[in-house]
Image (spheres, rainbow, N blue to C red):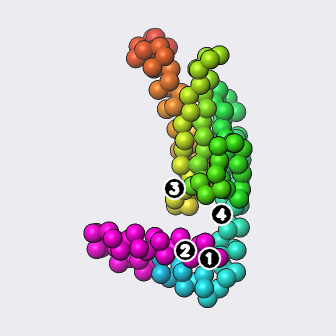
Amino acid sequence: MKKEIKESLEEIVELLHDTDEIVLDKEVKEKVENVLAILNDPTKLAREKKEYKDRMEEIIGLVNNTITHMDVNVDYCIPEVATTSDSCGILDNPHIVLTYAVDDYTTRTRRVSLGKAALQSSSQDLTQHVALAIEEFKNEIDNNRWGKGHLQRDVG
C-alpha cells in the first residue's frame, strides 16, 4: 500500500510542475482522490490489483492466440503477472519484448509498452495494437533487409 501511495504522490508532484492548468486541476484531483480512496479502503487496492492481474492475463492469452502464425518470439515483462524474459525487472513498467530472427546470426528486438494504454483500452483493442506492432516490426526489418522494393515484389 505504501508503494502505491508513494507513486500516486509522486505523480501529483509531477503534475504540479506541469504548466497546463486545465489538465492539472483535473488530474491532481483524480490522483488525490485515489490516494484518499486507498487510505479509506485498503481492500480497494487489493481489488484493483486483482482486476489488473486478470486483465493482463486476458491480454496475454489474446496475444498468444493472435501471434500463432507470426515468426516473432514474444516475452512478457508484466511484474506480478507474467515475466518470461530474463531482462525483466520487478520495477519495470509492463511491456512486451518482441524478438525477430532475421537470420541465423541476427535478431532484432522491440519493446511494446502496456502501461496506461492497457488500462484505458479494451483487451481486444490492446491485442490488436500489439498485433499491428508486431507486423510493423517485421515489415521494418524486412524492408531494411530486402530494400524498399521488397513489398512491391511480393504484391506484383
Q: Amino acid at mark 4?
A: Tyr
Q: Secondary structure at mark 2?
A: helix
Q: Quadrant of residue 56?
A: bottom right
How far apart, in angstroms, are the residues tagged by discs 4 and 1?
18 Å
Range covered by the magenta-colored residues? 1-30
Q: Going from the N terminus, do you reach mark 3 or mark 2 first?
A: 2
Q: Badge 3, how many Cα within 10 Å: few under 14, some, many 20+?
A: few
Residue identified by numbered label 1: 2
How far apart, in angstroms, are the residues tagged by discs 1 and 3?
24 Å
Q: Going from the N terminus, do you reach mark 4 or mark 1 first?
A: 1
On residue 117, which mark appears? 3
Instruction: Residue at 69%, 42% (x, y): give it.
Output: 85
How far apart, in angstroms, are the residues tagged by discs 3 and 2?
22 Å
On residue 44, which mark appears? none
Magenta-drawn stretch, dominant element (helix, strand or loop):
helix
Q: Secondary structure at mark 4?
A: helix
The percent position of residue 151, horizontal first and vertical second, equals 45, 17
Q: Badge 1, how many Cα within 10 Å: few under 14, some, many 20+?
A: few
Residue identified by numbered label 2: 6
The magenta stretch spans residue 155: no
Mark 2 touches mark 1? (CB < 8 Å): yes
Q: Secondary structure at mark 1?
A: helix
**Is residue 38 visible from the viewing direction of this image?**
yes
Q: Badge 4, how many Cα within 10 Å: few under 14, some, many 20+?
A: some
Q: Amino acid at mark 3?
A: Ala
Residue identified by numbered label 4: 52
The percent position of residue 59, horizontal first and vertical second, equals 66, 51
